[in-house]
Amino acid sequence: MGTLRAWCLGLLAVGIWCLSVYGTGPSPLPSDAPASEFSAARANATLARLLGPERPHPVGSPEATVFRERLKAELTRLGVPFEEQTGQSCYGHGRWRACATVTNIHAVALSGEGPEVLLMAHTDSNPRGPGAADDGSGVAIILETIRALKARAIKPVHPVAALFTDGEEKCLCGAVSYAANAASVARTGAVVNVEARGSQGASLLFQTSPGDAKLIDLYAGGAPYPATSSLYPEIYRALPNDTDLTPFLAAGVPGVNFAFLGEMRNYHSPTDRRANLSLRSLQHQGDNVLSMAGALATADFSTLKDSNAIYLDIFHRWLPRLPQAWAVPLALAAFLMIALAGYFSRRDRRTPHPVLASMAPLLLLLLCVVAGFVLYAPLAFAGAPTLHAANPVLQAALVATGVGGAWPSNPLWLRLALALGVWAAALWTVRWAGPIACWLWFAGLAVVSALWLPGLSPYFLFPSLVAAPLLLLTLRGGRGIALFIAALAGLVVWVGFTAGAEDIEGLRAHLLFTLPAGFALLSLLPLLAGRRLGGSAFASAVLALIFAVAAGLTVA
Ligand SMILES: [Zn+2]
């Protein structure tokens, strides 16, 4: 009975994973879609004209000039006046400092009053590739957005303009030179930057300016498939990466940054070609840019620097959000409510041992991490890493964690291996687990993250806010239903994270799979607490190893 229940819950988690990956998202609109809509087919045709024979066009190259000539022809075709601005600028420090002579193109698409909504993409490519996604797609998306906005024949409050920058790949020099001009900054009300770090996947709102609550409201209100989380800006801040938005944020201009990251192997590579570019990603990114441009065009710019929000999207459909200032009090309240529920139902017989029960969640997470290292080993062994660190310890860490390591030619094998591995860990841990202890861990981590990494807090806080009142309300009966609903909340949030994280490093960075999957399973443990499922755990572990070897035998 316990075994059947466990495997049904496992299937539920798989179902939620499928919903997260395949459930929602736009279908690419054809070229005869209504003129007021963004059409991926039209944007793709524009991109074909912009790229011509698909040659690299880095800053300063003759190909870069040709690309700009094609762009100017597209603007003329749209009836949009533009201005070329040539200048010299530098960016960076020490040996990362670089300079370039750049030519930006500034175009006013729709007239209005006050500062502009500035849509931004870069015209140059990395020297290694033709830059179909990075950032030809951004340029084509802005052109298709301008076309759709003009077709809507709505008079915006603010002007809508485009800035096509130069020299982004080398030194952000186009954006730096534009943002260094006080008059240019003064005429900019808000920026929408359009980028790509791969050629597929969801278009993520991955960066916002500080005080983003109002920007997130505008995005949630307009975007048909919101894909974002308050964790992304937090992670992005910690990375050494920059985009054209950086100099604008430094100048205090509010802004948002969109990118898709899937199939990162095409990033800055000769394979960043139109043939590899996903039309779904193009449509998603276009829908995001068009809805954000439309919302900003009528927004009150004085409200765009607001307080911070915490948020995460559910199935790219809903975007629950709260003021960041509420995170700590709400997390503390949830912790207290769960603790009270535990106190008043302390005779819950399913908790075998309070100390073991309080440690079981930690054991589960630890086992999930270990499973990742063990199951990635065949792939790490079979494929030579593409990154090389001078320090042997660092190199070993790079290989074992999968960063810069081999790509499985079919991600399914590794996906199954890791899924069964973390599942085995959960089945084995479950005998020591207790419902209250599991949810106290969730609420406790909500408190800790709210204090020190607020962007991460909704991942713990939102499920805790579902669990806490339900546990208090079911002291006298109905605990099973309460735990099931709470588990659903935990699964939706954390399985969604697990599925989305695969876009970042394609499962090579297995920690991005095993840890979030561990938290997803932590919300399931209360439903199986106290059961002995060692047999199922062993079978899962064996299957996981078999799939891991299969993944290792099929290195790309
Ligand atoms: Zn780029």
Image (tube, rainbow, N blue to C red):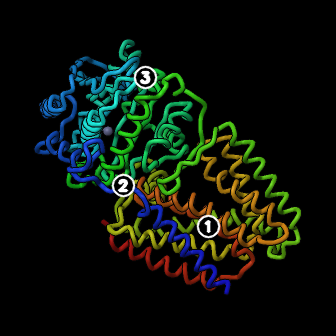
Residue 521's disc number: 1
Mark 1–mark 2 Cα distance, whole angstroms, equals: 29 Å
What is the secondary structure assignment of the residue under circle 2?
loop
**Disc 1 and disc 3 in contact, CB within 8 angstroms:** no
Quadrant for the C terminus, please: bottom left
| Mark 2 neighbour density, 10 Å: few (under 14) some (14–19) many (20 or more) | some
Residue drawn 67% across the image and 63% down it = 486
Total labels drawn = 3
Mark 3–mark 2 Cα distance, whole angstroms, equals: 29 Å
Mark 1 or mark 3, earlier in chain: 3
Residue that label 3 marks: 189
In this orientation, which residue lies closer to the viewer: 283 or 54?
A: 283
Residue drawn 35% across the image and 74% down it = 553
Report whether the residue tagged 3 is closer than 8 Å to ligand 1.
no
Q: Is residue 162 visible?
A: yes
Q: Amino acid at mark 2?
A: Pro
Q: Position of residue 484 (x, y in %)?
A: 67, 69
Residue 26's disc number: 2
| Mark 3 neighbour density, 10 Å: few (under 14) some (14–19) many (20 or more) | many
Rendered position, 352 above or below 239: below
In this orientation, which residue lies closer to the viewer: 195 or 113?
A: 113
Q: Position of residue 10 (x, y in %)?
A: 57, 75
When asked about the image quadrant of residue 493, the answer is: bottom right
